[in-house]
Amino acid sequence: MGGSLNANHLLFLGHGALWTIGLSLIAFAGGGIAAFIIALCRISPNRAVRIVTAGYVQLIQGTPLLVIMFLSYFGLSAIGFSISPLAAAGASLTVYVSAYLGEIWRGCIQAVPKPQWEAAEGLALTKAERMTKVILPQAIRIATPPTVGFMVQIIKNTSLASVVGFVELARAGQIINNSLFEPFLTYSVIAVIYFALCYPISRLSRRLERRSGLPRIKPVTA
Amino acid sequence: MDTNGAVVSARDVHKSFGPLKVLDGIDFEVQRGEVMVIIGRSGSGKSTALRCLDRFETIDEGEIIVCGHHVSDPNIDLRALRQDVGIVFQSYNLFPHLTVEENIILAPCSVKRASKTAAKEQAKRVLAQVGLEEKLHYYPEQLSGGQQQRAAIARSLAMQPKVMLFDEVTSALDPELTGEVLKVIEALAADGMTMVMVTHEMGFAKGIADQVLFMHRGKVHESGPATILTSPTTPELAQFVGKEL
């Protein structure tokens, strides 16, 4: 017991940091796919589809990620579906990300001016062609800065996976602290690592926002 | 089918937005090669009438046939209709993420399955038609309003429409830029393109229209050859064109 922070500890933290990155990637990929579907459902011409997905978004946005984690790990195993901490954390983050990113992307799709749809329609493009060739390329430009910004939230929120026993960066820090009893030092190191992961992405987001170079159609002045 | 050779025909068209009656029994016909100009105050229903022809608005009653397509039929093949009808809007609506050339070849390549080479050749031709051949690789934001509108006209022409609809296409432009766009439209008319246009350019309407429709409160209040603009018979049109009866 005791001792001081040594190379082995740092190696262990590094390992945890890799899982933080891995879990972030899982959350971003899984959540991204789900979010795209959510965004499309939210602007569906079908009212029932819109209402159901709006309900889903409200439900998830109104539930703490911590509770979603508990539900998917302890809750599911209590009713007979035992899943690994990684699966539980990955699924929880996917659900969480889908609700937020889905709304961000819905807004970005709807931010493309409506006349763009009409112009595409007037050129006899099908609905799918209008979406993929005219609307989405413009929506993606609008969506890039907020999406990159949201990735920072995802990275930080993976720390909640520690509550289901998944050893990512925060949990690795807890474990080390349990043997070192140096909370200030240990958690400072953890904080620095999180910062090192997040800061470049925030910078990127801010840069993208500054030159959010969507060539806009000049507003009609008459 | 219409039998009298009309490219566009509207019969007893009614349309309401909620309690507001926008079109209250409209009739007109446009023959092949004819230019029909629709004029009227804001809110008289002229833009709605035009938009109904390309089914951007659906109508409540009546019948519209455009190039043999029954536009009022709920089962209409919209893709076929819109290949025959070109529409140009007040706000140009070029796709900002695409160059002028990409804007023009998008629909021919995806809708008509034209080869890229053929579509690019055609893009050059239609751009020459509107006097913009040197702007092929520009993005819309790099063009003036008048140039953007001419590029939008070229984009429509690339689909080789049988009829062109113009919805106040110069209303967002200053007089100088308006002139360059109107010149393009004049050239199209001289080439025999069938056109329906909503405009506030009375001088231009006088020169180009085979038929003028004056709309007032959702009805065709007065119609006839372009001479009705100089010698109107109803007080409303007289007031609109600023003439004493």
Image (cartoon, rainbow, N blue to C red):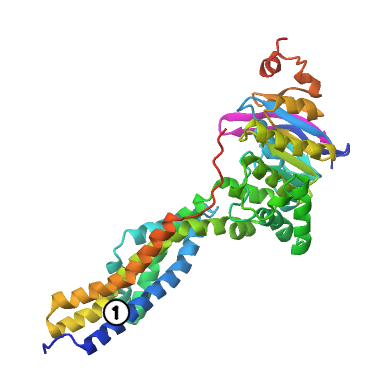
Give, as a three-letter code, the residue at label 1.
Glu
Q: Which chain carries label 1?
A: A
Q: From the viewer's perspective, tell me whether residue B202 is left or right of residue A103.
A: right
Q: Which of B130 and A65 is in front in this view?
A: B130
**Residue A94: % across, % down:** 40, 70
* The magenta stretch spans residue B17: yes
Q: From the viewer's perspective, tell me whether residue B111 is left or right of residue A24.
A: right
In which quarter of the view is residue A54 placed?
Answer: bottom left
**Residue A3: % across, % down:** 12, 88
Q: From the viewer's perspective, tell me whether residue B46 is left or right of residue A105.
A: right
State which region is magenta. Answer: B14-31
* The magenta stretch spans residue A133: no
**Residue B192: % across, % down:** 85, 39
Residue at disc 1, secondary structure: loop
Q: Residue at x 64, y 51 (%)?
A: A120
Residue tagged 1 = A168
**Residue B23: % across, % down:** 66, 30
At label 1, counting other C-alpha atoms closer than 10 Å, the crowd grade (few under 14, some 14-19, many 20 or more) is many
Which quadrant of the figure contains the N terminus of chain B? top right
